[in-house]
Amino acid sequence: MAQFFLQIGSCPVSSATVMEEERYAEALDTLVVACVDIAVLHKKSILLGRRSRYPYPDWWILGGRIFRGEFFEDSARRILRREGNLVIEDKARFRRIGLANFLWKERAQLPAENGSQQISITMLVKVDDGEVSQIEPDDEYTEFRWVPVRDIKDGEFHEYVKECAASVEYLDLEK
């Protein structure tokens, strides 16, 4: 079966990229959030961050919401800059490798037990030694760790993180 990822058109990027917490919580009760997650790959290892907040406060790949007017690669570049201090100018370096639909039982916003739903486009970007030296976690993460792809697949990680690792290994992108 053939797969495709299509991005068409344009609209202005919203200057109101962040909603106040109460309004955002109300929106989460009704809407599905669109996100981009990024598997950052270096020498057969993926960058994982230990998240400090919901919906999944554990080891995860970097990611966040898509803002109105952004294409997937634009979101990925913004998120890497904000969450990891990593600047990648060339959008062509990003490759789409997956799609996930998350139904979270809890969320950071009150009431937490209302949960949320998120659709996430999974991107891959390979980085070199110089870029690795720039990477630093923001306050969303307590630490970063480079974990070999095989260790992720065989380890105690969320099913989604394991699927990301399996996709990277399957595509054999390090050769």
Image (cartoon, rainbow, N blue to C red):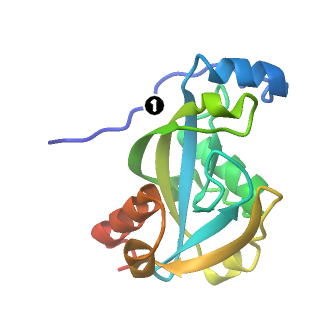
Query: Looking at the image, which is closer to me, 16 or 140?
Result: 140
* Closer-to-camera residue (69/103): 103
Q: Which residue in the rendered view is the most extreme toward the front?
A: 113
Which quadrant, please, contains the N terminus? Answer: top left
* Residue at the (28%, 68%) spot, across then down: 170
Give coordinates of residue 99: x percent, y percent: 40, 43
Vertical placement of residue 36 versus 166, above or below: above
Give residue 6's quadrant in the image: top left
Outermost residue to the left = 1
Q: Give the left or right position of residue 86, taking residue 35 as reference.
A: right
Can you say whether 44 is above or below 156 in the image? below
Q: Crowding at label 1, few (<14), some or many (≥20) Cα neighbours within 10 Å?
A: few
| Horizontal arrangement in the rendering, residue 58 relative to residue 157 (left or right) | right
**Residue in the image at 42% along x and 61% along y:** 164
Frontmost residue, 166 versus 40: 166
Percent of width and height locating residue 127: 58, 72
The answer to which image quadrant residue 47 occupies is bottom right
Nearer to us in this view, 130 or 164? 164
Q: Name the element at disc 1.
A: loop
From this view, report whether residue 3 is shown above or below residue 163: above
Q: In the rendered image, which quarter contains the C terminus?
A: bottom left
> What residue type is disc 1 on?
Gln
Which residue is rendered at x = 37% and y = 38% of the image?
5
User: Residue 121 at what x, y percent from top left?
Assistant: 47, 43
Q: How many marks?
A: 1
149 left or right of 113 in image:
left
In the displayed structure image, the side of residue 10 where residue 160 appears, left or right: left
Give the labeled residue for mark 1: 7
- Residue 136 % position (x, y): 78, 70
